[in-house]
Image (cartoon, grey):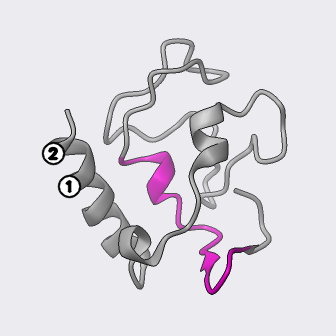
Amino acid sequence: MSSHVFATDTAACRAGCGACCIAPSITSYIPGMPNGKPAGVRCAQLSDDNLCRLFGDPSRPAVCERFDYDADVCGEHREEALTTLNWLESTTR
């Protein structure tokens, strides 16, 4: 993620949320995390401002590139997104 807002059809990603960079496991290579990352672990590429340092970079994992804001997943605020993503991660293992 970067400092700008990412628009979709009716909503936008909350810049600075970072829930999608913490809650889910990622099994593919991430710069700084060659074996991916476990669920609940902050991505090495997530800045202190909860912005993706790889946004727009070709080294950004495809799974991250494909993730898009969805109100059913991201909810109304960051804590709701973390709760939903943690639940999804635990129920899809």
Identify the residue at image location x=68%, y=75%.
Answer: 8
- Kindly identify the amino acid type of the residue bearing the numbered disc 2: Thr
Q: Place residue 89 in its image quadrant.
A: top left
Q: Mark 2 and mark 1 in contact (Cβ < 8 Å)?
A: yes
Mark 1, Cα crowd under 10 Å, few <14 / some 14-19 / many 20+, is few
Identify the residue at image location x=43%, y=27%.
Answer: 37
Depth check: give the residue in front, 87 or 17: 87
Left or right for 25, reference 88: right
In the rendered image of this protein, does residue 53 appear above or below residue 1? above
Write down the residue under mark 1. 87
Left or right for 4, reference 83: right
- Report the predominant secondary structure element of the magenta stretch: loop
Identify the residue at image location x=21%, y=40%.
Answer: 92
Left or right for 47, reference 69: right
Instruction: Report helix, strand or loop for mark 2.
Output: helix
- Kindly identify the amino acid type of the residue bearing the numbered disc 1: Trp
**Which numbered disc covers residue 91?**
2
Residue at the limit of the structure toward the right, as seen here: 57
Residue 64 percent coordinates (x, y) = 60, 42
In the rendered image of this protein, does residue 58 appear above or below residue 34? below
Residue 12 percent coordinates (x, y) = 64, 78
Residue 67 percent coordinates (x, y) = 56, 51
Mark 2, Cα crowd under 10 Å, few <14 / some 14-19 / many 20+, is few
**Magenta span:** 7-23
Residue at the limit of the structure toward the left, as seen here: 91
State whether residue 46 appears in this view.
Answer: no
Q: CA distance from mark 1 to mark 2?
A: 6 Å
Residue 87 percent coordinates (x, y) = 20, 55
In the rendered image of this protein, does residue 66 appear above or below residue 79? above
Question: Is residue 42 magenta-colored?
Answer: no
Figure quadrant of the C terminus = top left
